[in-house]
Every structure is written in structure tokens, then in C-alpha cells.
Image (tube, grey):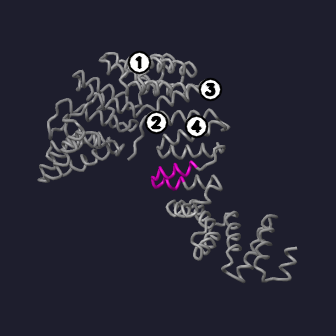
Amino acid sequence: MLSRLVSESPADLKALNLLGIALTESGSIDAANNAFAQALAINPHFFPARKNLAINEFNQKHYAQASPEFRNILQDAPGDEIANIYLGEIDFKNKDFTAAAKHYQAARAKISVQPSWLLHYAECLLVSRSVEKATAVLKLLPEQDSEDRFQAGILLAKAEAYRPAARLFASSRKTHHDAYTAGYDEMLMHVKAAEYAEAIGTFEDLLRDGHKTAELYNLAAEAYLNMNRVQEAYDAMRAGTQIEPESEDNYIDLASICLEHQEYSLGTDILNVGIHYAPKSYRLYIQRGVTYVMRGNIDSAEKDFESAATLAPDKSLPYLALSWIWIEDGKSSKAVSVLREKANEPAFDYLVPYAFGVALLHSGIEPGSPEAQEAIKAFELSITRNSKFSNAHSELGKLLFKAGEIDRAIPELKLATELDPEDAAPFYVLAQAYRKKGQSAEAAKMLAKVSELHSDEHKQDLKKQLIRLVRQDTTSQAQATP
């Protein structure tokens, strides 16, 4: 009927548009587009046909053809919501998130028609760190749409918006096809948001639903520790390790939490269990050695670090830990002797030459001596293997300052402060360097930063450094990034 009507009245715009719609619904897209194009040839401002043509091009993924059609519509009708939505989608696909967000905003009244549009709009807002706006947009997702609410939770989690992410995972969990994953993610978000009571509530819900996994118990142990419920943390840890007794990561994660909360005895107990089930894990020996250090049991710590070095002779961290023990025990010469041989071996990463340099410093070297030059080269080698390691830049800068090489020292010290703005030591030496250069204003800024950090300790705290590096190594040996 429409074809006959068009034949009888070939200039009837509405008939041509209706014919195009009918052909689109029947799957004859090319014929439909011809009908829309015919209408536009008669009247280029007949927007229903242009809009339908543009949508067909978009649905066929002909974005380069669809975009100018939608933009033509906006020239005469800048508030057209459909044109704005589709242009937002095209910009989103092209990763032009700023432009996409503007189009989505212009189509705000229609954007909730499709959940994918809401998710895309929220992602654009999160790119610009508009977390509150993104959260408000995601609240428009239908309550029963568990999959899209789950995806929304992932978006907010990536943006470190943990509280609203937890709420979305919670609403998703009710009907999601993988209720355990949604529940675990909800619990994880509560922990990251320091909502520990809520995390335990979710944990108990999941247990009642029959979900008993090692990762769930480990996360509960972390929440309990943060609530100072040490016995319950230990019980949760034990339950988790009984489910996966040979998974070293479970013990590593929990021991790291114990170190953070200064629960050193509990950390040792956890690692004793781990070593029983995974006796060839060098990481477990390193972690247990650190708990012994914090408890003042240096002999036991040294034995564990030696065991770690035997189990993993190509790893750097055991030698760093051993060098700390030897330095603390007044055996810097032993550390120098062992590390001198290994520092230049390509199998080791940045930590071994760094540890060698520190050992040389503690052996009592004088500025300008051959040993001082050797230390400078060791720190430079460490930086070559990992340019992002702040400690090596800091120690190199301090050595150069002592040697009177102020112009070389300042860039190293500045980089150290940028890489680790919480370490007061390089700020203090940098202030001295600026004074030497007559830059009193810059020196004052550096001293103000030292005061802000509440520290007048300008010597490297090896114990704190060791703990930090062990934490860094809890998942895997750190990789060099030149």
C-alpha cells in the first residue's frame, strides 16, 4: 500500500518516511535508506527522514556516515535528544569522552531509555572525575537490572568510589546470575571504604547462602583486624587456609595486614601455618623474617632470610633483607662482600645494587673515596634498572651532595621527593642544597615540607624501608621500569 501511495504521490514526504520505516522493520535497510534519501532530496529539512536514515547508518556501524546526518539535525534543532544521544554514542566509541558527555547531558530526559546509555554517560563523567554526577546517573538504572547495576559497580570501583560501588553491587546481588561474585565485590568495596561492620554483614549473608571460599574468609579477616577483633580475624584466617591450605597468597595477604596493624605475633602464627603447607615459598620466609624483626628476634629473622635466598637465589628481596640484618648487627663488611659480587649480575633487579650502595654507606665510607664512587655507581645502576625507585634517587642525591656535586644532587633529590612525597629525608637534604646555591626561598619551602611530615629524622630508617619493600613484593617481585 505504501509503495502504491509513493508511486501515486512521489513527493509525499510522510509516505516516503513511513515506507522507509516499514522497509527498515522488514530488514530491507538499503531500500529503506533510499526512501529516506528520496524524501531528503525533496526537502533537506525534513528531519524525521534524516533522523531515521542516521539511525539506520548507526545501527549498521556506519558511524562516519551517521555522524554528519545527526549534526545536520542539530544545526536546526540543537536540543534534539535523539540526535544528541546518538552523537554521544559515536563520540564515546571514538573515546572523545568530553564531547560525548556534552551530548548525553543535552539528552538527559531520554538517556534512561537504554541502560547502556546511562553506563556510557557515567563512564564519561568518571573520566573527568565527576564522581558525584556519575553516581547520580547510575542511580537511574532500573532496580531489577542486576547485570547493568553490576557493571555500574565496576565502573565506580575503578574510580575508587567505593561506597556507592558497594551499594550497586548490593542491589545487583539480589537477582544477579552470579550472586557470589556480586556479594564478594560488595564486601570488598565495604572494606576499601572502611565500612568494616557492613563488610562483616555481607560476609555473614554470603555464609548463610552457602558461599564458603578462602578469599571470602581472608577478606573477613582483614575487616575483623581493622575492627580490632583479633581472635575473629585469626579464626577467619584459619577457616580460609583450611579451604585452600597451599595457596601462599592467602598467607601473604593476611601477614601484610598483620604488619600494618602491628599484630606481629599473629602474623608469625599465620606464616607458620603457611610454611607448613608451602615450604618452598621464599615469600613466606621473607614475610615471617620481617615479623621476627619487628619482634626483636634478629637471629630467627636471619635464618628465614637465608632460607628465602636458598629457595630463590635469583630474587633480590632476600639479599636486601639479609643486608639489613647484617648492617643492624654491625656486619656491614659482610653485606658489602656478598652484595658486591651480585650487584652487577643482570639476573637481579634494582634492589641488589641499591642494597649494595646502602651497605657501602654503612661501612663508613668517606666522600670522594673509591668506595664512595662505588656507591654512586651502585645507586645509578639501581636507577637504570628502575627509574621510579625513589630510595635510590634519594641516596644518590645525598651522596652527591656530600661530595660537593650540588648541581648533580638537586635533580636526584627533587625526583625522590616527587616519587615519594611522604619521605622527609630528601626534602631536608634538598633544603641544604638550595641553601648552598643561595636559593633561600626554595630552601624554606623544603624545610616547611619536612615540618609538615612531622619528622626531624633525616637518616634512612632501614626497618621501615624493609617493611615497605616487602609489602611491595607481596604479590610478585617488583619489575624494573627504566
What kind of element bears circle 3?
Answer: loop
Against 421, residue 90 (above or below) is: below
Q: Are marks 3 and 1 in contact (CB under 8 Å)?
A: no
Q: Position of residue 369 (x, y in %)?
A: 15, 38
Q: Nearer the viewer, mark 1 or mark 4?
A: 4
Farthest residue, direction front: 109
Closest to the observer, 176 or 259: 176
Circle 1: element type: helix
Would you say the residues marked 2 and 1 are in contact, meaning their CB atoms lie under 8 Å apart? no
- What secondary structure is found at the residue carrying circle 2? helix
The residue pinned by badge 1 equals 266
CA separation in Å, label 3 and label 1 = 26 Å
User: Could you tell which of marks 3 and 1 lies nearer the N-terminus?
Assistant: 3
Which callout, 2 or 1, points to the residue nearer the camera? 2
As drawn, is 17 to the left or to the right of 288? right
Residue 232 in picture, x, y percent from top left:
48, 19
Q: Amino acid at mark 3?
A: His
Q: Which residue is mark 4?
A: 170
Of the residues under marks 1 and 4, which one precedes in the sequence?
4
Mark toward the start of the polypeptide (2 vs 1): 2
Q: Which mark is residue 192?
A: 2
The local crowd at label 3, few if under 14, some if 14 to 19, many if 20 or more residues have their Cα within 10 Å, is some
Q: Amino acid at mark 1?
A: Leu
The image quadrant of residue 371 is top left
| Screen quadrant of the N terminus | bottom right
Q: What's the residue type where badge 4 is placed?
A: Ala
Q: Which residue is mark 3?
A: 211
| Residue range corresponding to the magenta coloring | 122-139
Q: Is residue 295 left or right of residue 242?
A: left
Q: Nearer the viewer, residue 322 or 205?
A: 205
Type of amino acid at the residue the image marks with label 2: Lys
